[in-house]
Image: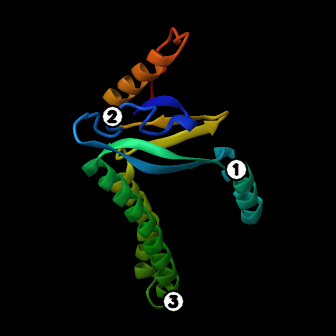
């Protein structure tokens, strides 16, 4: 998915063009509220030391951005519901994990299958409902947010809009492809 760097304080309908960030369409696009949070990914290593320490460091280093992004109604609903389904998959995983522990006493095979499903359910939900369905925050720092968007057309239009208002537009296109 292509990436774009936006000023965090310009996530609104006055500073961005009406192009759906998911589909790239320009018809029937509305600005919808979004909230993004980001913390450095190296914090996950601290979980090996202590979960509480990792949580505290993540909260201290977390950066948040609120604003509005342009979406078509269908794309916004898919993105929002995908996040809900992903959250529910963790509840299911927790239930399967506890059920698997208790099932190990009576039937080891059933308990093993339940624990395997506990691991697989969030992965499957992420692939089915979240991946490539909406904007993904890659980094937030220095008043800028780096987003990965499903639509290359949207990235190109957003970048063109940003470059049009710049006094010295960058010589290199800021659109980057992930490997």
Percent from the top left, x then y, of residue 149? 40, 36
**Callout 1: few (<14), some (14-19), or many (20+) C-alpha neighbours within 10 Å?**
some
* Residue on which the image places disc 2: 18
**Callout 3: few (<14), some (14-19), or many (20+) C-alpha neighbours within 10 Å?**
few
**Callout 2: few (<14), some (14-19), or many (20+) C-alpha neighbours within 10 Å?**
many
Q: Which numbered marker is on residue 98?
A: none
Residue 87 in view: yes
Q: Classify residue 62 as left or right of residue 110.
A: right
Mark 1 or 3 closer to N-term? 1
> In the figure, 72 relative to 26: above or below?
below
* Residue on which the image places disc 3: 105
Mark 1 or 2 closer to N-term? 2
Q: In terms of depth relative to the viewer, which is nearer, 99 or 54? A: 54
Residue 48 in view: no
Q: Classify residue 42 as left or right of residue 91.
A: right
Q: Secondary structure at mark 3?
A: helix
Mark 3 or 2 closer to N-term? 2
* Residue on which the image places disc 1: 43
> In the figure, 174 relative to 135: above or below?
above
Residue for point 33% across, 34% down: 18
Residue for point 37% across, 23% down: 156
């Amino acid at each position: 998915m292509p990436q774009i760097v936006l000023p965090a304080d310009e996530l609104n309908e006055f500073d961005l063009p009406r192009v759906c960030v998911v589909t790239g369409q320009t018809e029937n696009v509305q600005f919808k509220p979004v909230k993004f949070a980001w913390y450095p990914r190296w914090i996950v290593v601290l979980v090996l030391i202590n979960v509480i320490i990792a949580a505290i460091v993540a909260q201290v280093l977390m950066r948040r951005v609120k604003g509005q992004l342009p979406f078509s109604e269908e794309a916004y609903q898919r993105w929002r519901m995908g996040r809900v389904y992903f959250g529910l998959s963790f509840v299911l995983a927790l239930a399967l994990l506890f059920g698997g522990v208790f099932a190990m006493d009576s039937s080891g095979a059933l308990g093993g299958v339940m624990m395997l499903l506990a691991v697989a359910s969030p992965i499957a939900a992420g692939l089915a409902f979240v991946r490539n369905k909406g904007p993904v925050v890659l980094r937030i720092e220095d008043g800028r947010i780096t987003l990965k968007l499903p639509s290359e057309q949207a990235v190109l239009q957003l970048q063109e809009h940003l470059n049009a208002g710049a006094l010295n537009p960058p010589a290199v296109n800021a659109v980057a492809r992930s490997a």
